[in-house]
Image: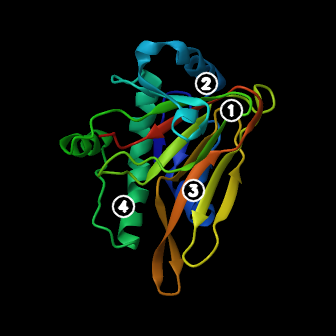
Amino acid sequence: MTAAVHAGSPTLDAGKTAESLSALGYAVVPGLLPAPACRALIEDYGRESAFRSRVVMSRHGYGRGEYKYFAYPLPDPVAALRTALYPPLAAIANRWSEALRLEARYPVDHAAYLDICHAAGQTRPTPLMLKYGPDDYNCLHQDLYGEHVFPLQVAVLLSAPGADFTGGEFVLTEQRPRMQSRAAVVPLDRGDAVVFPVRHRPAQGARGAYRLTVRHGVSRVRSGDRYTLGIIFHDAA
């Protein structure tokens, strides 16, 4: 099962994504966005009409840097990614719910899932762009915005490591029951995406599936500017 993002771009292989999430806790999708699309999104960062709010991380203890939430209607490339990536990820999310014996089930169509969010008062769009400069970083966190939380999200690196910036690695940690946390540094090139859990993922133990708690962040940028597109599938209250 695959999801076409847009003409000429790669697809997300749900089988490989599920296998990587199970084995590593994340899945990399190489070249999800071509370089021209990455550059176009970066150029649009200064277009204030495209965004509903701006957050300066240091004011809230989130780290250093800033991010902006897109406003509805989302720009076409962002809306297309959100719509196309959701169905294969919803299939994975439903299997996770079954494994963890959770009640939540996710419709196949993203518009139907947004209807559920909006009926609960979660009406503000959550896709965002993040900008980091020298010495900026993002503390480990989870993107939780209300009662309804879709368990997977996607981040797309828009800048070129080594050319546009140095440092700024994407980092995940997993808290395992009665054990110390495990960290992973995820290597990404420009246009690559990483699929990762928002809050929890299942792991198989001797007595069946149990939950691992996941947080994500970005290490310190040593030089240059690093831009990222974040695709979150639930809306915010």
Q: Which residue is drawn at the image coordinates 47% and 38% (left, top)? A: 231
Q: Which of marks 4 and 3 is in front?
A: 4
The residue that disc 3 covers is 16
Of 192 and 7, which appears nearest the observer? 192
User: In this figure, which residue is indicated by the disc labeled 4?
Assistant: 94
Indicate left or right for 189 with 69 as reference: right
Looking at the image, tell me whether mark 4 or mark 3 is earlier in sequence order: 3
Q: Helix, strand, or loop for circle 3?
A: helix
Q: Which residue lies furthest to the bottom in this view?
A: 206
Q: How far apart are marks 1 and 2 (CA)?
A: 8 Å
Q: What residue type is labelled 4?
A: Asn
- Pointer 4: residues within 10 angstroms few (<14), some, or many (20+)? some
Residue to which mark 1 is pinned: 190
Disc 2: which residue:
38
Rendered location of residue 228, percent (x, y): 59, 32
Depicted 198 relative to depicted 78: above or below: below
